[in-house]
Image: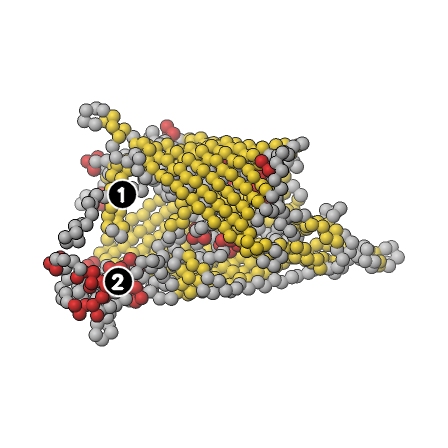
Amino acid sequence: MISKILDNHKLSLLSLALLITSTHNSANANGLTFPNNNILLNDAVYQQKVNGKVQSTDGPLAGATISVKGSAKSTSAGVDGRFTIDAKNGDVLVVTSVGYKTQEVTVTGPVVNINLESNSEALQEVVVVGYGTQQKKESLTGALQAVKGNKLRDVTTPSVENMLNGKAAGVYVAPGAGKPGSNGGVVIRGQATLSGTTSPLWVIDGVIVGSSPGDINPDDIESLTILKDAASTSIYGSQGANGVVVVTTKNPSASKTSISFSTKMGINQLSNGHMEMMDGAELYDYFASFSNPADIKFPRWNSDLRNSNFDWWKLATKTGFVQNHNLSIQGGDDKLQSYLSLGYYNEAGAVKGYDYDRYNFRLRTNYKPFDWLTIKPSIAGSRRAVDDRQYDVNAMYGNLPWDSPYDANGNLVPHRYSGWVNNASTNYLYDLQWNHSANTNYEFMGNLDFDVKLTDWLTFSSVNNYRYNTYSDSGYQDPRSNSGESVIGRVTDYRMEFARRYTNQILRFNKTWDKHSLNGLAAYEFNDYWTKTLDAYGTGIVNGFEVLDVVAKPERTKGGISEWAVQSFLSNANYAYDNKYLAQVSFRRDGASNFGTNAKYGNFFSVSGGWNINKEEWFKADWVDNLKLRAAYGSVGNRPSSLYPQYSLYSVSASSSYNGIPGALISQIGNKDLTWEKTYTTGFGVDAALFKNRLRLNVDYYDKKTDNVLYQVPISGLTGVTSIWKNIGKMQNRGIELTIGGDIVRNDNVHWSLDVNLSHNVNKLTELFETKDANGNLVSKPIIAGDGSGIAGSAQRLLQPGYPVDTYYLKEWAGVNVDNGLP
């Protein structure tokens, strides 16, 4: 398979996929033995192993159910659609799969292959939503979008975040840093907070893992569901304000043992997009166009510069190479099934000096010792290693095309070279031969889950997870390099480890009677987090020595331990009458360690409804497969990014010592009245499917209003600190989303579909807290805060009602002076 893949400036020119399937059949055919030891081998009663494959126009149907009609025998198709079942000639196999028409096939021999037709009632497809609940699409009342794993893997990248780009309306993926393995930033329906991360909550196999999916192997993902509105996310309470991404990994099924292997290889090149760099002649003409030559400050300014041209971009980049290999083995019987996967990803970066390696493994097992008990242990791990030469692509833009990085003998020239036109500049190629850093991350996650079937309609589920990470980062800055020469070199060493425990005890119910159906859950959840860091560096080294023992001046040694915990009580119920009229309600109560006693707990809720118009008897448009109206209202929340904002804190460190005696300085003023930031969302939606599901349409409108916005407000440094945590005001995000999908060609041999999504979001700050002016009157004053340093240098951020929260406080320019070209 040859494909072109363009993602995050990485061009994959070649994708090779190999699938190897191995079948192991066990046991000889059984016969019937009578008392006189005669064996009857009549075809009508002869039991045999029947092998086959279930597929559709989209390919193999993993998880399809195959059962022998009139008996208790059943099995499931594996990841490649293959299955094995005991049956005799004349038996009827009943084959079912969500979203497809049920088919009955008569056994006439040991091999049976089945092609299932797509069900025109496409909304029978099952979607995994909050807390592992599976619902048919037609019964959903919230705004969400499901993405199958094979749709994610149409790009070659190690990051699941990057794979979301363009997959769902209202989901924006900001480009990563451009380094191998860098992740994009995911924002769902606009920026919902001013403090902390804007990334969504990630949930993997029912376990809350935080604002990042970690180093999960994309090849292990079966499906992914993006929860966007309050009806879908309120059950996650204070962790759902930025949206939720629910990941379901591949689950073992009862089938023959199958082995799958895939490999992808390609090249990547860094692109400037639509921006072109000036060459020597163009840059000279640009400066020469100034009417006042005195404004040109370069030494050796003469027309010969038009003939000098050094392409710094090409000198610092290269053609990178990407390879991705995945192996999986799965199978089992009715009692025990297992899935094992191994993965390797390597990327030699398109920027010189950058390389990325990652190894993954995952083992999932389902064991059913009794009909009422299923035990589900699993373990996953990864190792990620990155080599980094400490320079990014931004350094390439600062050098003039008139200045060569090499002297007449072909040697790299040092920084601030006297022979350069811009002799104040640095030669980053010179540093590439000296400086380097490397970081390594190990991640392990283990689960011990089980389900207990109490009655036909009541099940108890227990999810128990432990996650451990260890990260190390070491750096070396040579005394000859630009960053190291002023301090005679620097060695850095950073270590971090964290552990996270998670447990969720859920009681699920699912009851149907007459035309009514009711399902839901009630649960208790607890998770806590512990992290420890150690950071040290020193200066003054001999060239080539890269350990802290050799430094002449230990400059800094610091570390810390921090922890937090959240416990929750939650419930959800979904009701449907005749599958036409739908209702859903959720409630959650969160308690968090980073709030004071005055606001330790927060409550969150949602109510929503839906109407399947196409199921009304008076609706006669046969070409409309589905037409549903949805409405929802609810709340989610957010906590401060600081772990202890309710406490006044003191810092005990080297900076607060006096004459070698330890001391303490105030570092934070606490706010025990700090309360939960809450976002209330109103949403309306329309879902439609036409022409036997060949054309699909989703439209959503939402209005998100955030109250008690959390922010670290700048205060006078005379207090000993520079900011304090407060609830400062209100914010709004309002938008519309449109998704259109269609099957251009759909037959037994070819399936060609096209999906388009559009979204528009408007953000603004609507209120700011009021303070007293000199006359004692309450007034609302804008907040101006620094925003660090970017390409254009440092900038100021303006928070003022009526403006978007990402407004920058900049000078207003009248334009360009036509006489001299200056601003």
Type of the residue with mark 1: Tyr
Q: Position of residue 443 (x, y in %)?
A: 44, 52
The residue drawn where x is 49% and y is 37% is: 685
Q: Secondary structure at mark 2?
A: loop
Q: Quadrant of residue 388?
A: bottom left
Residue farthest right in this picture: 36
Asked whether, in this view, residue 310 is left or right of residue 337, the answer is: left
Q: Position of residue 648 (x, y in %)?
A: 29, 34
Residue corresponding to mark 2: 278
- Mark drawn on residue 552: none
Asked whether residue 398 is in view, the answer is yes
Q: Residues within 10 Å of mark 1 (few under 14, many from 20)?
A: some
Label whose residue precedes the other's in the sequence (1 or 2): 2
Residue farthest bottom in this picture: 409
Q: Position of residue 99 (x, y in %)?
A: 61, 47
Asked whether, in this view, residue 245 is left or right of residue 78, the answer is: left
Above or below — where is 633 with respect to 344? above
In contact (CB < 8 Å): disc 1 and disc 2: no
- Mark drawn on residue 808: 1
The residue drawn where x is 23% and y is 35% is: 715
